[in-house]
Image (cartoon, coloured by chain):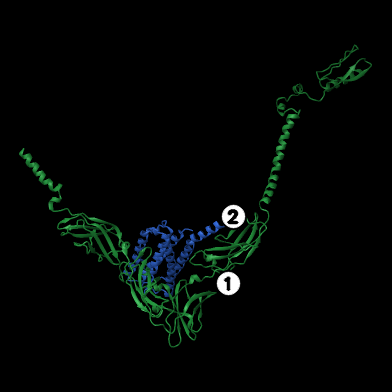
Chain colours: A green, B blue
Amino acid sequence: MLALLGATTLVLVAGVPWMLPAAAGGTNLKSPQNVEVCIIDDTFILRWNRSSPSVRNVTFSADYQILENGAWLQLPGCQSVASTECNFSSVKLNVYEEIKLRIRAEEGNNTSPWRYVDSFTLFEKAQIGPPKVHLEAEDKAIIINISPPGTKDGGMWASDSSGFIYSLDIWKNSSSGERKTKTVYSRDKIYELSPETTYCLKVKARLLPRKTGAYSPVYCIKTTVENKLPPPENIRVDAKNQTYILKWDYAQENVTFHAQWLHAYLKKIPGDNSGKWKQIPNCKNIRTTQCVFPKNTFHKGIYLIRVQASDGNTTSVWSHEEKFDTQLQITLFPPVITMKSTNNASLRVYISAPEESENKPVNHLYPLIYEIVFWENTSNAERKILEKRTDFTFPQLKPLTVYCVKARALIQDERWNKSSVFSDIVCEKTKPGNTSKTWLIAGVCAALFSIPVVIYVMKLLFRCISYVFFPSSKPPSTIDEYFSEQPLRNLLLFTSEELTERCFIIENTNTITAVEETNQTDGEHKKYSSQTSQDSGNYSNEDESTGSKFSEEFLHQETE
Amino acid sequence: MTSRCILQTALLVYFSTTVLAMNYNLLRFQLSSSSVECQELLLQLNGTSKDCLKDRMNFKIPEEIQKSQQFQKEDIVLVTLEMFQKTSDIFRRNLSSTGWNESIVENLLATLHWQKEHLEEILEDIMQEENFTWDHRTLLHLKRYYLRIVRYLKAKEYSVCAWTIVQAEILKSFFFLDKLTDSLPN
């Protein structure tokens, strides 16, 4: 009994720590809550909430794991942290690599369970910080120089720095302050400003597809006094045969001009590219407001062109840097149309590429659609359709009417807006009689086909009728098979031919009279008469041949 | 008469909408011609007589690109943009050891940039029109792939053999780009 009591007490004492673990060494530690990762450029912050608000000697520690490895490593900057956030920017990690984090609360030897953060990559959680901006003023423009967010080499945006798209907001510092938003390069100019005015601006960087950064602080600058020599304006490039013609506008006379070009991609690279502008051939120190240069100066690409004016003493600032896309200068040639009128008052249209001239048109290289204008010759009502096919029909038009058509080729992209001139007008008259004509033809054909059918049917009918009303006396052929012997045949069949027999009637020996007797149908008729002692009967035989034999014998006897 | 009028209007509306839907036809044409030009230019960069076999490296092009899984057309725009962008970044690095003709490299960069700009325009349009869910996973894998190439070049100190290996790798990536372009809808 006592031993039992002692054993129970022992078990209870030993069991209590198991059942009440909290009773062992203080309160139970709960893991941190609402853990989130906050990354701006190259600053990585881990934040969380305490599970219980009571302030004690609770610290927090975090680990990280590169998913492919499997081992949990200590997160630098996040070991035994007293506050509810830590900065782990010093971790050396590939920003595109998937990692997992875990954090727990610690108090002395006591630790809470781990709280895990779902796997993520640093890049996907990163937000773009504000870019740095440097400004320089001209009289009617501001030169901006944007440095990409983040650190220069390495860091979060190392691979993507040339992919940033910068959005700029600019407004006059004065009362009205109407804001304009533009997309700018990292080294760019903002034009069409007023001289001696203070402008304020702010810039943000974007990365496609969906990362938008924070705005930079607002910078303000005042434009300078207006220059005596303004820069050229309205720069444009036209293509003609194998050359490009660069044109611009300039109000003053007696000035010389100077044009330069630059690869547009150089603007996307942060850094100074002022030394990379190159001279456009035939466009230095010219007095006219245009210059002509060969097409092969520029390979396929996007370029920037700027022009400067000079009157000998002073030079103007550079003009607006005009974007020049070589592919937008292509000339589309008008297509060639042929039209045919088909039956049922329709018109069939064929569109073909223009003939090869010496210039070798580039039409065939691009996917084209055609804008077709279609109208009745007498009216002015035009129908416009867009058609991709080169062979199509206008159905169900008015018969015996003249319709006209003209078409032009378009590049099928609303952004490009490139079209050829209209082709020559082609007119054609539709054929007459639509449905009635077809019915007539159909009827004639049907009639032609039906004649042999009708004849055949009539023949059958006639056969039927004649079989019923005018039967044939000819025996059916099957009887021939069964009754091939002649006597039986004669017995069964009533032939129309008469069996004739030559009979000799002998009355006296003196007179011999040949009498012919005909057999009657009901049998053989024997007729003889004998008056002499010589009883020579006349035997009528079945066949004539024996009869005639007998008569010959008799004659022979007589002559003896 | 009214029925014919309605038919004509319907035809006009139909053809107008097909014009907008056919945007991808022009893009597909542009992408394939840009790809051909870039490959031609890459092949014009003359090779080296040195034996570079020991410098060979498996850059592990992403499986999604290699196996040309079915992408949505918007994702194809994003992926091809990334490829042109990153190829352009690579060829702007230190090429002094190669002795390659500078104007060929400039033309290559110009062509890459031209196509990139047009892809960006289309992407901006897509972003304005719809709230599309992008395939971030493939994009991430692609970024990792190009980072491997850049790190390799840095580790080999932009040697001529390293550039020769990278030139071959970029040509290979254009092959997969062509397959992606072909899967654009008509």
Q: Secondary structure at mark 1?
A: loop
Tell me the residue that label 1 is attached to. A358
Tell me the residue that label 2 is attached to. B2
Label 1, residues with CA under 10 Å away: few <14, some 14-19, many ≥20:
few
In the image, is residue B139 above or below residue A250? above
The label on residue A415 is: none
Picture coordinates of residue A222, whole percent (x, y): 36, 79
Q: Nearer the viewer, residue A437 or A216?
A: A216
Snapshot quadrant of residue A185? bottom left
Quadrant of the drawing holding the N terminus of chain A: top left
Write down the chain letter for disc 1.
A
User: Could you tell me if residue A133 is visible in this image?
Assistant: no
Q: Identify the residue shown where x is 56% and y is 55%.
A: B6
Picture coordinates of residue A225, whole percent (x, y): 39, 83
Q: Secondary structure at mark 2?
A: helix
Q: Identify the residue shown where x is 48% and y is 80%.
A: A281
Picture coordinates of residue B59, whole percent (x, y): 35, 63
Query: Is residue A92 left or right of B139 when viewed as pictured?
Result: left
Q: Are marks 1 and 2 on the same chain?
A: no
Write down the chain letter for disc 2.
B
Q: Nearer the viewer, residue B79 or A545?
A: B79
| Three-letter amino acid code of the residue under disc 1 | Glu
Picture coordinates of residue A193, whole percent (x, y): 41, 77
Quadrant of the drawing holding the C terminus of chain A: top right
- Determine contact: label 1, label 2, CB under 8 Å: no
Snapshot quadrant of residue B152? bottom left
Q: Nearer the viewer, residue A112 or B52?
A: A112
Q: Residue furthest bottom?
A: A313
Q: Residue furthest top?
A: A533
| Three-letter amino acid code of the residue under disc 2 | Thr
User: Could you tell me if residue A354 is visible in this image?
Assistant: yes
CA–CA distance in space, label 1 to label 2: 49 Å
